[in-house]
Image: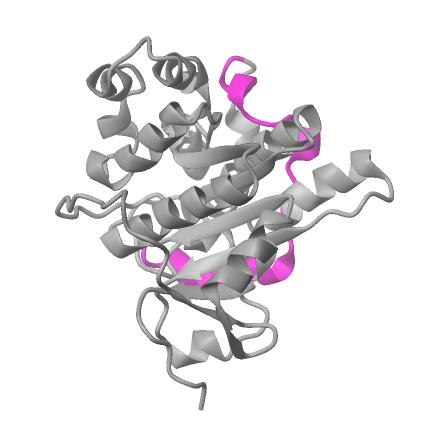
């Protein structure tokens, strides 16, 4: 999936081992203010948030190295931290828990969570993050919708789902099919996907995907309000806040009344000038390379 791609398709990448010993050496570009900021300054800011989204391009190893480094740094600044992962689907939370407790090996985790069939990107992209979570006793939250539910929705729509199939997704009343600008952006992407599903069904599947992950993030915040939740997810779920962030905010604000709520989204290693000039697409671009001044 490319940097701006949203959907069900995946690509194959070559596994590159990640280095868990490297220090954070990156440049952060504040999209709202259109200025560079020191990574140490941004990390302190992230540590004060409720949710931090680390928006990856799934097949880019540099993004996963950056995720690891940021999680390591944030854990030092704020030890009460949880990691939400799109890479694991909700029915397999108990499998993740057993791995974190030391009851399963990595090979058993992959097999019992059906990782290769349900996600399929190289295990080495995420293994160092999971090892770090295990060694520091950090919760890892399985966020994703079961693949078969997303695909059925894309084929036949939300109303076709049975009660059994709805076990791991939000209730229909909590699935908000909007906003229109999100639908418009997805319409441009729709033509790139194989299959005969209508645009409406494609949109329903994408929104269900977002709402399912948002529900789990919000539940974690409600159950453990002192934790910082760091979310590993594809960039397409974050752009302009329409995918996951707005749906998390809707849920949290319904229960927190006037308590402040802060979310910060990072996109990794984005070089396209039109994105870097867009003040609304995310909060930061995080790059391991120097970012040139915006023209």
Q: Position of residue 207 (x, y in %)?
A: 54, 43
Q: Position of residue 125 (x, y in %)?
A: 25, 41
Q: How is the image coloured?
A: one colour
Please identify the quarter of the rendering in which residue 25 is found: bottom left
Residue 266 lies left or right of residue 175; in this view the side is left
The dominant secondary structure in magenta is helix
Q: Is residue 68 above or below residue 179?
A: above
Outermost residue, left side: 14
Q: Is residue 119 above or below residue 17?
A: above
Residue positioned 32% across, 8% down in the render: 103
Residue positioned 45% across, 66% down in the render: 285
Q: Is residue 293 magenta?
A: no
Most foreground residue, 81 or 211: 81
Residue 148 lies left or right of residue 156; in this view the side is left
Q: Position of residue 237 (x, y in %)?
A: 48, 50
Most foreground residue, 114 or 77: 77
Q: How many marks?
A: 0
Most foreground residue, 140 or 275: 140
Q: Is residue 174 magenta?
A: yes
Residue positioned 54% across, 17% down in the render: 167
Q: Position of residue 227 (x, y in %)?
A: 62, 33
Q: Is residue 237 above or below residue 96?
A: below
Name the image quarter holding the C terminus: bottom left
Residue 201 lies left or right of residue 16; in this view the side is right
Q: Is residue 239 visible?
A: no
Most foreground residue, 288 or 2: 288
Give the residues in magenta.
164-192
């Amino acid at each position: 999936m490319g940097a701006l791609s949203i959907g069900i398709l995946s690509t194959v990448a070559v596994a590159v081992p990640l280095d868990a010993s490297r220090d954070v050496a990156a440049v952060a570009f504040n999209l709202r203010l259109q200025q560079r900021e020191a990574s140490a300054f941004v990390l302190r800011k992230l540590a004060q948030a409720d949710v931090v989204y680390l928006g990856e391009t799934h097949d880019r190893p540099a993004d996963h190295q950056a995720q690891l480094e940021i999680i390591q740094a944030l854990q030092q600044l704020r030890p009460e931290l949880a990691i939400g992962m799109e890479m694991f689907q909700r029915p397999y939370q108990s499998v993740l828990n057993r791995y974190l407790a030391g009851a399963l090996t990595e090979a058993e985790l992959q097999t019992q969570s059906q990782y290769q069939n349900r996600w399929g990107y190289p295990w080495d992209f995420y293994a160092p993050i999971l090892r770090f979570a295990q060694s520091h006793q950090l919760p890892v939250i399985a966020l994703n919708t079961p693949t078969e539910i997303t695909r059925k929705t894309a084929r036949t729509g939300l109303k076709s789902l049975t009660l059994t199939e709805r076990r791991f997704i939000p209730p229909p009343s909590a699935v908000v099919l909007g906003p229109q600008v999100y639908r418009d952006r997805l319409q441009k992407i729709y033509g790139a996907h194989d299959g005969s599903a209508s645009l409406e069904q494609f949109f329903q599947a994408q929104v269900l995907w977002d709402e399912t992950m948002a529900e789990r993030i919000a539940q974690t915040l409600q159950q453990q309000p002192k934790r910082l939740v760091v979310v590993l997810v594809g960039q397409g779920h974050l752009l302009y806040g329409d995918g996951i962030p707005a749906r998390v905010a809707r849920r949290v604000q319904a229960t927190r009344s006037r308590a402040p709520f802060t979310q910060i989204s990072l996109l990794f290693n984005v070089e396209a000038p039109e994105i870097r000039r867009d003040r609304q697409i995310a909060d930061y671009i995080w790059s391991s390379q120097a970012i040139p001044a915006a023209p």
